[in-house]
Amino acid sequence: MSQSRLDSFSALQTLTVDDQTYHYASLKSAEEVLGDLSALPFSLKVLLENLLRHEDGQSVSTKDIEGMKAWLDKRSSENEVAFHPARVLMQDFTGVPGVVDLAAMREAAIALGGKAEDINPLSAVDLVIDHSVMVDNFGTEQAFEQNVQREFERNKERYEFLKWGSKAFSNFRVVPPGTGICHQVNLEYLGKTVWSEKNEQGQLWAFPDSLVGTDSHTTMINALSVLGWGVGGIEAEAAMLGQPISMLIPEVIGFELTGELKEGATATDLVLRVVQMLREKGVVGKFVEFYGEGLGQMSIADRATISNMAPEYGATCGFFPIDQETLTYLEFTGREPHQIKLVEAYAKAQCMWRDNDNPPVFTDTLHLNLGDVEPSIAGPKRPQDRITLSEAASAFESLMAKTISVKNATDVVKMMSEGRQLAEYDQPNETDVAVEGEDFSVDHGDVVIAAITSCTNTSNPSVMMAAGLVAKKAVEKGLSVKPWVKTSLAPGSQVVTDYLEQSGLQDDLDKLGFNLVGYGCTTCIGNSGPLPPAISAAVNKGNLTVTSVLSGNRNFEGRISPDVKANYLASPPLIVAYALMGTMTKDITTEAIGEDASGEPVYLKDIWPTTQEIVEQVRQFLTPEMFTSRYANVFDGTQQWQDVGADDADEAFDWEASSTYIKKPPFFEGMSPMPTEGEAIKGAHILALLGDTVTTDHISPAGSIKEDSPAGRYLKEHGVEKSAFNSYGSRRGNHEVMMRGTFANIRIKNLMLDGVEGGYTRYVPTGEQMAIYDAAMKYQKEQKPLVVFGGKEYGTGSSRDWAAKGTILLGVKAVITESYERIHRSNLIGMGVLPLQFTEGKSWKSLELTGDELIDITGIESGVQPKQSAKLHVHRSDGSTDEHELLVRIDTADEAAYFKHGGILHYVLRQITGK
């Protein structure tokens, strides 16, 4: 740990717990100089402590610390500060390219006159392998074992590489596959609430646990009062190497919770309501902090469900302060008694203990009475689009009315309510398509995937027990899942399996096909695996709008399955219920979901557990011993993991030329000791014109690799059979695959083309339509720069570094939009791509761009300064030129420095090597 070299505010004090003395930066002591800090939001108190502890007169100055106090006057700030997280959390999809970059940086460091060992994590780094298991097999006792076997077969090279990294780098640990999802492992084991470690002088320091992670749902740990959020892999790599996270002191939105959930409502229903409210409020780039007497009724698991989905409501974090429930959870999950005493003593010494009588002040506030929360789902393609459960069927009818072409759209609603077929209304799409080899058919609205998945809900024993109880009651009634539904259960940790098995509820889930398929993100990340071939064929034959239901946090189009157009987020017990009903076209709250053994209708209310039943199951079958037992040897892994070979821990990685998984990236090739001067962008072609809410799922390669895609062609050319393509996520360590999949999502719409979905563009010199990758390579051969235009909320979604890496490798010099989501804008800068924004009221549509224009960007020739303006020059095909002002979305001095150097890693590399 680096220590404060200055103490301008006399903050450095000691704290004794169990005869152990800790040094710490005292907020109470700093108050004597700064003034009263008691009303500062708890999340900003964590930030202030971080600044006090790292004051050095350079990255952290007295002005930065005074800016935190000044925040109380305006409740907002334009001050830039440097945040030094205690640790970094990675998952394997984003972690592999991070380790690839570090390995490449070692070679670049040598080329610049430095040493390989200079490139080494300075902060604690944990990488959890959780994104690689796919649901190939389901509904059988053998599904888990078979899926794990396939996982190791597919990912042998990646796992060998990660093992090399764990040996070659210090401060770098790998949690093996099959353990759980990184965020749940973080919550149940890694997170400490208060961190402690010795500095270079041997002093033991205590300070708030904090982190950044290479997955946007890193925010889940905010429930345990750990400040952290998702960053791009690029930023995370810099943080590992000792660079602070540069940020403006954020506005903090206070979200007051009162009352308690009513009978029948779950934590999932609550978080969907919270997401909807905060999206409507607009909290992008802001902290959200929860307060109010309702927190006293809320478990850490329920809080974690809310914190987890901070990216879905757009906030940087969703923070809960320390209270008695924090201590109870730490004790129950097996943390050391001394650690729990330290958390309480430290929180009270720092005035970081929640007090209902004296809440902080906030930039703005919202209020929700928990008793007003209704059972809900969200979809069909955005998590903020909440639908009250009783209105789900009618909402799907409306969706069909908008998306299916008929002579009279109202006929669709009439048809569905009457149970008639679309063919009766002269509808060209097929419907009620027979499944070959089966005695059933599939139709619009049928649920073909029902997945209990994701860290969001599988971390919560209450909703998992509720799912088990729904299964138990359904089995007792003689119900069964509809035969066209692909069912799966992928818990976030092995503890979930323990309590479901101990309670006997796993047996009931198994009887309905919700057998264990793996410990990982699975369906939520797009690893749902293929539908049974006959069902997939029927869906595609009829061009059917079939549905999925999943207990995840993301349902963006094209993410869950290429066969499924409408995806709905729901609680685990509702997942089971919808699997039984098998369709989204019926009102699950009033219509029968099936028939019992006597042929009598069974309704949702007949199988839905009471709150008391759920509480009793959790109380009886979830024990502290489950946590201590499962995490006792968390880094050892199974025999399969132990059998994975790895090269000796050489300082430099031995790149295998024939590998299609791990390739040396080109980012540092020909890197000069000093950065080059800035220059204008001249004569750029437009690669894509994109609409609003283009997500990182649209931009970054994700999901399956199509055989006829540029990436598929590359793999076949390198001897890889289609059956061994694996996913884009598993091949993130190979830039050749990833750049070919950038902007290649099957649902992306490049509006340069009329009515075309997928990763295509118009190659302007010939007017030919082709894959975006193929066109970009043609432009590169001609040494033509490229730009991309977007709409509002460009880059919404996960912290996908390849959305930025792929963009720069395609030759895109600038992205021009109406607004950005935080993480992707930062990642673009981190890779040397210039993010530009239209002035208010302007857009590429208002400029009437077609994609045929040539683009100049000027005003950046002498380098860029934070929030400066630039000029957009549009050269049209008729010979005319018009100019427009743009805002350069480089918001801080550190971001300007990163861009000047061509990216954050280039900046860090030059800093480390003294260049």
Image (cartoon, helix red, strand yellow):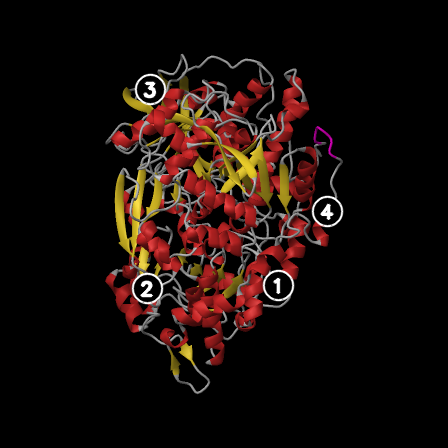
Quadrant (top left/top right/bottom left/bottom right) for the N terminus: top right
Q: Is residue 783 above or below residue 403?
A: above
Q: Is residue 302 above or below residue 677?
A: below
Q: Is residue 468 above or below residue 74?
A: below
| Residue 264 x, y percent position in the rendering | 35, 67
Q: Which residues are magenta?
A: 649-653
Among the two numbered marks 1 and 4 on one chain, the one whose residue lies closer to the N terminus:
1
The answer to whether residue 129 is left or right of residue 753 is: right
Q: Nearer the viewer, residue 106 or 503?
A: 503
- Per the image, the residue denoted by label 3 is 868
Give the distance between the C-alpha atoms of the residues marked 1 and 4, in whole angstroms: 22 Å
Amino acid marked by disc 3: Gln
Give the distance between the C-alpha atoms of the residues marked 2 and 3, in whole angstroms: 47 Å
Rendering quarter of residue 463: bottom left
Give the distance between the C-alpha atoms of the residues marked 2 and 4, in whole angstroms: 47 Å
Give the distance between the C-alpha atoms of the residues marked 1 and 2, in whole angstroms: 31 Å
Among the two numbered marks 1 and 2 on one chain, the one whose residue lies closer to the N terminus:
1
Name the secondary structure under disc 1.
helix
- Per the image, the residue denoted by label 4 is 644
Q: Nearer the viewer, residue 854 or 830?
A: 830
Among the two numbered marks 2 and 3 on one chain, the one whose residue lies closer to the N terminus:
2
Give the distance between the C-alpha atoms of the residues marked 4 and 3, in whole angstroms: 51 Å
Among the two numbered marks 1 and 3 on one chain, the one whose residue lies closer to the N terminus:
1
Q: Are marks 2 and 3 in contact (CB under 8 Å)?
A: no
The answer to whether residue 748 is left or right of residue 590 is: right
